[in-house]
Image: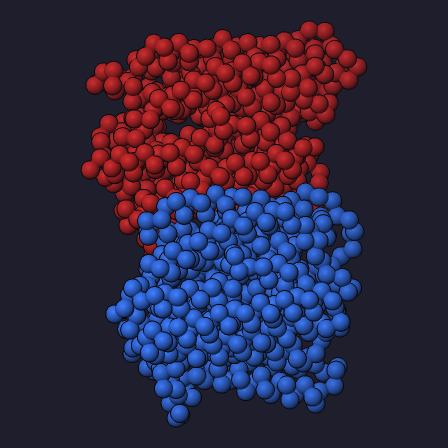
Chain colours: A blue, B red
Amino acid sequence: MNLQDLQIVAPELIVLIMACSLLMLDLFLSPQRRGILHLVSILTMALAAIITLRGHPALEATGTVMAFADTVIRDGMGDLLKVFAYLIMIFVFVYSRHYLKQFNMYRGEFYSLAMFALLGAMVLISAANLITVYLGLELMALSLYAMVALKRDDRRATEAAMKYFILGSMASGFLLYGMSMVYGATGSLQISEISLAAAQQGSDSMILVFGLIFMVVAMAFKFGLVPFHMWVPDLYEGAPAPVVLFISSMPKLAAFAMAIRLLQDGLSSLHHDWQGMLIVVAVLSIVLGNLAALAQQNIKRMLAYSTISHMGFVMFGLLSGTAAGFGASMFYVITYALMSAGAFGVVIFMSGKGIEAEKLSDYKGLNQRNPWFAAMFAALMLSMAGIPVFVGFFAKWLVIQAVVDAGLIWLALLAVVFSVIGGYYYLRVIKIMYFDKAKDEAPIQAPSDFRAVLSVNALLMVVLGIFSAPLIAACMAVF
Amino acid sequence: MTSSLPLLSILIWLPLLGAVLVLLAGNQRPAVARWLALLVASVTLLLSLQLWTGFDTTTAAMQFTELKAWIPVFNVNYHLGVDGFSMPLILLTTIFGVLVIVAGWEVIKDRVHQYMAAFLVLQAALTGVFAALDGLLFYVFFEAMLVPMFLLIGVWGGPNRVYAAVKFFLYTFLGSVFMLIGLIYLYLQSGSFNILEWHELGLSMTEQKWIFLGMLAAFAVKIPMWPVHTWLPDAHVEAPTGGSIILAAVMLKVGGYGFIRFSLPITPDASAMLDWVVIGLSLIAVVYIGFVALVQTDMKKLIAYSSITHMGFVTLGLFIAFSIFRASPDGFGAAMGVEGAMMQMISHGFISGALFFVVGVLYDRMHSRDIADYGGVANVMPWFSMFAVLFFMANAGLPGTSGFVGEFMVILASFNASIWIAFFATFTLILGAAYNLWLVKRVFFGEVRNEKVSRLRDINSREVFILTVLAVAVLTIGLYPQPLLNVMHASVEHLLQQITQTKII
């Protein structure tokens, strides 16, 4: 380890230092002054973003730079994902504060746990070695388990935390098992070396394919893909809204990076094998996610199944195995994280007085109560449904283009048919907000920073749709 | 020709900007919202007249073109332009942009600003669909128009509005996603989303067939053709008057326009091979739906079904060209079929718009669309009945009105293809006369049926204005269609050239 290495991981260092400092700071702050923690967290994100965006001299020359004996990689894909992770963290912090105050959960742990989860995600994004992958994943996952259980007196939240923990540990076990097989087959933990060794053996090596299967299972679990999705609806329903907001957005970026690191960087020579596996989980996720979402009356569960189907779409770009496909998936996952953050932002916006706005009927006549936020929620829903000019459409367009390009037109047909079916439940939310009469006319109260950020978040759906070119170009350029 | 002013962009973005301003007017000041919306729509209409005056009728090339890179990585461009097909349709859109706002003037009392803004957004999307020369841009506008229409039906519609709105949305959405895959495929083959380049793109028969079917799914739902027409009567019945007007007058034309811009020139060989499908479905629409219209008891439903039969003439006129070319290589009459289809679209725009307004006028007074509730309206509303009878006659295809021109041209063209097709097509004259005249007899003539009818008041100046504008349009096109035909002539010739050249490689 030398100074050079530290410079490469400067963003991670900042987050680590600040996460520890927050923990300390919390001890010395009186409850009235917790706002400082909030402010410091947001400033940290801004600082990390600046450091990340400043880049690294070696990055411009070669595109990638390695650190810590080649166990950490810094490249364009990682930096782009991290920048959006910070942005989403800012959204999360602003949305959460309102809720945490209302539900008597306003404590420092939330901030430091979120920071540690982000650190885990960043390590995972930058992993160039199987050990680093596992380290990052576990750091992220353990922080998330704790966050789910933050509302410890709530039975549903504790149950969700237990479920998430047990299933998540199993997935980690699968991942380790897969990694050990890959290590056995290739003799290395270094992803670049695995790639070379795997290219020589190909899919003839039974042990390598077995390892791949276990790793894909673990990944599918982290994405919440069918048939490894069971935890998703229960977790979404049981966990407090800000935690769901967090879990549904930022970790997806990390999961995407993990998939790229393991499948593309590591085992691209087995593309044919993992393509088949991903097709299966993608199809199942899109079919089951959309059909199950139709039947939900609880908006958090509905959004859970919608996440499942969206993650199926993310697989589309990945499984195509082309650079344009990876770029498409990355665009999808980034815009999905933003959409999901906004949607849960609205759920928090509607919650108050100790009651979470979970039931769809809670949103009745929102257009009468608050036309602006009804329009914002409508924009988010239409974006999720994939209606132009909202950004969700461009994401769907790109991933469908990727599978058509890969010659899998039947997959594209299936996807569009199910996105029409999925269109129904998003429309239903709009119907409830616009066509139904409000149950109570009481105006909805939220602090002004919350309103501003939620507006920006939802307007991003339109702005990123009309001006999608720069982000698309950026996503395509890193592969 | 590139104009110095980005006229088409202004026609798209001005209503959008207007919509934002109208929304800012807020719920408390409906008068401001109304006048602002009217102002924006009127300015847009006046500007759009430049399309007509500045249009070069001698060329089939795109005019008023604009080209800017949009998503350069995938060669997607903000590419606009009009030819003889799209220019009249844009004018139709801007004219109705004003009329629907006037039509909803005092009728809509609830959330006026949102109502007006929805119409302005809808107008922008419709103009964009007709002006787009980029496949993805076209798709964006094609889908974007669903949202305001969905809200219009759902918020201001009748008792069964939620069902109708959702059905409308999902039907159209389902059709168009298949088109999206077709567009993506064309991009992957050509490396561009430029529609004009797609016109030149060589494709094998199998590819053409699948692309044709994908696009047929989108446009057949939109226009709509039997058997995917069932959303239309529901949407019409539940939509507010303004929504019905713009739906019938402009939105259905997007389907016909799609065939002209996409299906025919991009997949000419598949269109020639599968023309019997479209012709068959068109004749079913003309004959069967004609009978269905006859038995309707709801006036809006009757007009909705009559729209479907009239749209059957559009698809018939477009696809009859292939049989004409098969029958005689010189293709005599093919141009007449396509021009007839275009005339039919424009004329049907004015007539159906007028008819839905007529029903709206009655509904505002009686809160019923049931034919049985009426009778002898002519006795109490003479001025109104004069207009109404004119429009129902035009709907039946009376010579001298615009309704006659298009139908006559299409029937004449189909004689060149097959006498049997012409035979079935002429059913419309009988059936159209039957359902229109019967309705006129039951609603307008005869004794005053009941107390409520006797208390009806004749139309006010706002309603006279709308009906006069539409009556002038219907009669002008009916008596002197030549200027309109001149506009489209060069483009029609160009289209016929495109569809007679094989693209199989």
Q: Position of residue B107 (x, y in %)?
A: 69, 33
Residue A371 makes an appearance in the image: no
List the single residue furthest toward the top: B446
Give the left or right position of residue B182, taking residue A292 as reference: left
List the single residue furthest toward the front: A206
Give the left or right position of residue B230, taking residue B65 as reference: right
Q: Identify the residue at image location x=49%, y=8%.
A: B430
List the single residue furthest toward the bottom: A2
Q: Identify the residue at image location x=64%, y=73%.
A: A147
User: In the figure, residue B37 lies in which quadrant?
Assistant: top right
Give the left or right position of residue B345, taking residue B188 as reference: right
In the image, residue B444 sits, relative to residue A221, either above or below, namely above
Question: In front here: B145 or A286?
Answer: A286
Question: In front here: B211 or B296?
Answer: B211
Q: Identify the residue at image location x=55%, y=9%.
A: B434
Question: In front here: B274 or A69?
Answer: A69
Residue B376 makes an appearance in the image: yes
In the image, residue A79 sits, relative to residue A4, either above or below, namely above
Q: Position of residue A237 (x, y in %)?
A: 66, 60
Question: In front here: A91 or A456?
Answer: A91
Q: Position of residue A52 (x, y in %)?
A: 44, 78
Q: Quadrant of the C terminus of chain A?
A: bottom left
Q: Quadrant of the N terminus of chain A?
A: bottom left
Give the left or right position of residue A361, taking residue B189 as reference: right
